[in-house]
Amino acid sequence: MEFITVIYLIYTFIAFYFLFLFMLIYFQNKGSFFSYPKPKKDYSLTMIIPCYNEGKTIERTIKSVLNAGYKNLKKIVVVDDCSRDNSYEIIKEFSKKYPQVIAVQTPKNTGCAAGSKNYGVKFADTELIGFSDGDSFVEKGSIGKMVGFFNDEKVGSVTSSVLVHNRNKFIEKLQSVEYKVIKFSRKLLEFVDSIYVTPGPLGIFRKSAFDEIGGFDEKNLTEDIEITWHLQAEGYKVRMSVPARSYTVAPSRIGEWIKQRNRWNMGGLQTIGKYKKIWFKKGMLGNFILPFFVFSWVIGLFGLFVFAYRIIRTIILEFLSTSYSIQTQTAIFRFSDINLTPNVLVFFGITVFVFSLWFTVIALLNMGEEKYKRESFFTVGFYMLFYLIAYPIILIISGYKFLRGYRKW
Amino acid sequence: MLENRKRVFWEALLLTIVVFFFGILIGVAFESTKVSEINNYYAMSEVSLMDVFALNSMLDFNSASCEVLTDSNLNFADKVYDEAVLLEKYESSGKITEEIQLAHRKYDILRTFLWINNIKTLEKCSKEYSTVVYLYEYFPEDLTQKAEQSVWSKILSDLKQEKGNQILLIPIAADSNLVSLNSLIDKFNVTDYPVVIIDEKYLVYDLSSVSDLDKYLN
């Protein structure tokens, strides 16, 4: 058997494994996918909204939190991180109109969301603290669907369904599909205690647990991943409420998208580095989340190298064949050259694709979302065939930047 | 608690092993159908070759005509060439087992036999056609050689189409590690692959157009 065939078979096995794992988790827990516990008491809550140059969206964000309908919401602390636009003026106007809204400004720009979030926590004295990004909008009723999870005293944080707000441009539509698949997968991971992130658009933390671990790591580019790992390392559980939704503004340009993904990947690498000593320790964090993260990197990068090697080899071969064909006045291409004889790798490839499509369709159908149209078949197909394949390229860029010591937002 | 969580990981692993195992089994079965198809062709070709050999032996006691023998050689070569094209297509589907590779080696022996038989025939009969033996490597060393071989195949296919029964085309993988073939190759002092040997006289190493090759033919 050729080496390349062995590589393909290993990748097929891995793809099958993770698809089956997720599908089994889904079918075993389908009944409780959308459920959330009723809160045993009215937990007091402070919402913190970090803001840096969010003049265009901050008003809507604050309004969405105000209208979220949680009756024991004590304060909304909006932290301006020394924005260069009119964000702080807008926040101050809100604080004049609504006594719940407290406008604060960091003494100097912290350079990261973690800095302003930690700063905002200083103004909170409630049992729970929630966070929402300055460019995200909380759906009405969402907070109430999250707090019940804190009935379990070991729950340190609760995350929500994060979805894309802007779905006009093609790149935004692709991200909308991606966010839905991520949301679906994250809930499945909850059933095996393996949620790896409490994303910024809407997450609620137990204040005592947050204080115990010292808040967000301000050196980390993805403080929402790091804090989730930290909580689990300290024995806390992380839960997800699927019906609680928050809509975020996704990048509309390729450059912004690449920048965002680089930050996510580099933050992921920072987190792996910080927790590298917990392999096979600390429950699911060391037994699954950390190995899964590392494995994803290895598989993604190695797969990309193999793919690139095959593509470059084919291009060189075609170039040489074409040159020789021209030189000898022979046909460059003939229909008889097309070989449609299938092989086992083709069968496996089709099977993996069909299972992946099935998984994606289930993820998209499991939304309960009414205000947006469903994605077109073309968008889903493009997402599966091209968007996902582009991701390992971002991994390389991120890995390179990380090794070069780049750590900026 | 952790044990309960772990159960689904093992279940997924078990399911993956089962599906993967069946997939491999189906793959092996699929490849086997292709191999048995090739083997059927091979068995028929083997019979045809024996027939040609018998005819050749009959020439010694004047029981067969040269015309019949050359026709048989040409027909057999065409048959084996068509089967080689089919075999090449099936080779790309042979990913798990090495049976198709083995079938290729068997065909190389058959084609070597044909070449030897043709040399013998030409010792006894007058030359009615040109012999074009194409020696290539089954496992090319680099991309340049692979590209050259791919273009050579097209050129020789065009040549065969143009010349029909005026040429007897025998493509053989030189790295099949066959003693008989190696001896023949040594006899012609072949130094590199791919090479086209025309009428056991001309060794063409450089890629040439159909019209250039035509100059070597009778």
Image (cartoon, coloured by chain):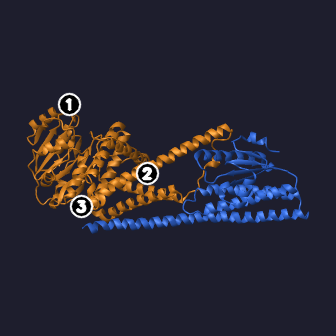
Chain colours: A orange, B blue
| Location of residue B108 in the rendering, given as x and y in whole percent from the top left corner | 69, 59
Q: Farthest residue to the top: give it.
A: A85
| Residue A282, label in figure | 3
Inter-mark Cα distance, 1 to 2: 43 Å
Q: Earlier in the sequence, mark 1 or mark 2?
A: 1
Q: Residue at x 48, y 56 (%)?
A: A8
Q: Are marks 3 and 2 in contact (CB under 8 Å)?
A: no
Inter-mark Cα distance, 3 to 1: 43 Å
Q: Earlier in the sequence, mark 3 or mark 2?
A: 3
Q: Are marks 3 and 1 in contact (CB under 8 Å)?
A: no
> Mark 1 or mark 2: which is in front?
2
- The chain letter under disc 3 is A
Amino acid type of disc 2? Gly
Inter-mark Cα distance, 3 to 2: 30 Å
Q: Are marks 1 and 2 on the same chain?
A: yes
Q: Quadrant of the C terminus of chain B?
A: top right
- The chain letter under disc 1 is A
| Location of residue A303 in the rendering, given as x and y in whole percent from the top left corner | 43, 51
Q: Residue at x 33, y 43 (%)?
A: A403
Q: Residues within 10 Å of mark 2 (few under 14, many from 20)?
A: some
Q: Are marks 3 and 1 on the same chain?
A: yes
Report whether residue B111 is seen: no
Amino acid type of disc 3? Lys
| Location of residue A249 in the rendering, given as x and y in whole percent from the top left corner | 28, 41
| Residue A84, label in figure | 1
Report whether residue A36 is seen: yes
> Mark 3 or mark 1: which is in front?
3
Q: Residue at x 42, y 64 (%)?
A: B16
Amino acid type of disc 1? Arg
Q: Secondary structure at mark 2?
A: helix
Q: Which residue is mark 2?
A: A303
